[in-house]
Image: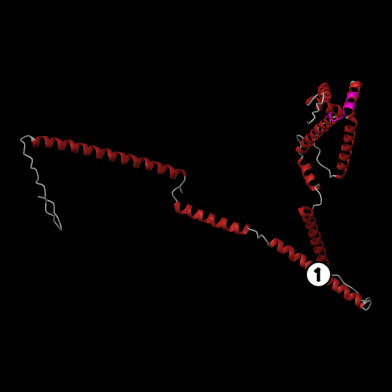
Amino acid sequence: MAAKKQYGLIIPKSKPQVLTKPSAFDDDSSDEDNVDARKKQVSASLRKEGIKRLEAKTTKNMLTEALCEDPSVFDYDGVYDQMQEKKRDSKLLGKQDRKSKYIANLKRTAEVRKIEQELAYERKVQKERETEGEAFSDKDSFVTPSYLRKLEERAAIEERLRKEEEIEKLNDVTKETDLSRFYRNVLERKTTGAPSSTTEEQEQDREKEDRHDYTDTFEQNDNEPLDEAGSEDDEGGNNDEGSGNEGSPPEKETDELDEEERQEAKEDSPPVPTVPEPQPETVEERRKRIFAKRTNEESALSAKERYLARKRAKLSEPTVITEDD
């Protein structure tokens, strides 16, 4: 049957203790074991005491050496007080050294207003004297030393304010009309090196223009009528050589125009820092470079002859006419 369910406090049953049976030789062995254990305990305690005494001795020696070197080495309270005093002194010095952000501008504005008020008062007095006319012309006028000192101080203040205004105007970027100041700064920095990117871009643009001019002249020769082409074949290489030389005059004219524009731009522009520029390329060198990159005269002539031969063959073909029934 299943065990009955129990409710409430359930106390487990205690296990019965197992009793050891006495032995005839147990007393001797237990005494020997106890003696060995006691010896081990005594030796361990003696060892610990020796270690403690050695540590205490070394600590005492270290303290004695430290006190001999510095008697205040363990004066923690005194060191703490000194640290607090240094903190207070640094705070006081920081408060004294701190300057206001706006007091200088306020003082300057007050000086300007004071001078303006004095000038206005002097103008008012001068107008009153002019209205009085010569009523008090026979009276003596006196100028005190304090008034002279005041005039000198006012003149010095006006001079200082004038210089400050000039410096502000010079440093004002919004009032710059040209790039002369920028170029002056660049010149002072003494910037030297390779030609700028603008020069490289100009060279690339020139090469593109040369290519465009060459392709235009080649297409123009191809689009000429057949009669003119035949006359060119009869004349031989003279016209071809002439065509090669015809490109030079406009190139010279464009070079001269470019040179004039550069001269005018240099005269109109502000002084720029001297940068080492590449040597100007002559017309012959540029023509040689262009023809060396793309094609030469012989290949152009052979291409033209092939084109004319194809054109003649096309025109000589018989035309077939078909009549519708």
Please indicate whether residue 322 sits to the left or right of residue 53 in the image: right
For the magenta stretch, what is the residue range?
A: 222-230
Give the residue number, with chain letter if any, for mark 1.
Answer: 118
Does residue 88 sit above or below 282 in this rendering? below
Q: Is residue 307 magenta?
A: no
Q: For this rendering, which residue is in front, 123 or 266?
A: 266
| Rendered location of residue 44, percent (x, y) | 25, 38
Packing grade of label 1 (10 A; few <14, some 14-19, many >=20) is few
Q: Residue at x 11, y 34 (%)?
A: 29
Give the camera-side residue of 240 and 81. 240
Q: Nearer the viewer, residue 100 or 283?
A: 283
**Residue 189: x, y in percent?**
76, 41
Residue 4, visible in the rendered structure: yes
Task: Give how far across and how far down residue 164 sits, in percent.
Answer: 78, 57
Residue drawn at the location 87% of the way across and 45% of the way down: 268
Tell me the element at label 1. Answer: helix
228 is within the stretch colored magenta: yes
Q: Residue at x 60, y 57 (%)?
A: 94
